[in-house]
Amino acid sequence: MIKRNRKRKIPSINMLSAGTEIRGDVNVTNDFRIDGAVYGDIICKGKLTIGKTAYIEGQINCESAEISGIIKGDIKSTGLVVLREDSSFTGNIDTAKIMIEFGTKIAMTCKTTEVTSDNKQSTDSASEKILSPFTSDGKGALSSG
């Protein structure tokens, strides 16, 4: 006999559509996709996806992030941060892992912090660099200070 009273966890994705604007802080307990504008801080307990049409001004604290839009502010993530080729980022990033695609426009300081199995944080201070934007000649050169 099949038990039907099991509660199934249904994944929840919150969305902010293009053309929609929020002025104020946003706190989300699941994944969150933004294609509109947010002027305020974002706390996301899941994956944060910033679409091509998105504009964010504020601090971001999330589990992981995939960015294709424009962000002006700092990001703190316990997982992977991906800056896609069509993204523009100005600020600081503190994350365990980062991936930056060719063509990304960045002006940032990045610090990678890994959490060990005993929940202690290990910071690689050698990875903390100030990066200037990619060159406009298409070569994608970065300089670090």
Image (cartoon, rainbow, N blue to C red):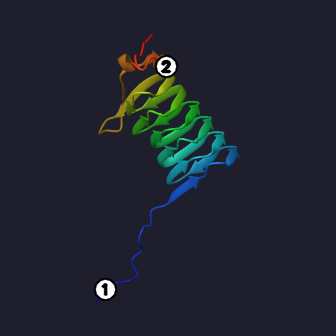
Q: Horizontally, is 34 left or right of 97 in the view?
A: right
Q: In which quarter of the image is residue 64?
A: top left
Q: Horizontally, is 124 left or right of 90 in the view?
A: left
Residue positioned 62% across, 39% down in the render:
41
Residue positioned 49% across, 61% down in the render:
12
Reading the image, the residue beneath label 2 is 133
Reading the image, the residue beneath label 1 is 2
Check disc 2 and report its element: helix, strand or loop. loop
Q: In which quarter of the image is residue 9?
A: bottom left
* Residue 21 coordinates in the image, percent (x, y): 68, 46
Q: As drawn, which residue projects farthest toward the right?
A: 23
Amino acid, disc 2: Pro
Which numbered mark, 1 or 2, is in the foreground of this view?
2
Residue positioned 55% across, 30% down in the render:
74
Q: Residues within 10 Å of mark 2 (few under 14, many from 20)?
A: some
Amino acid, disc 1: Ile
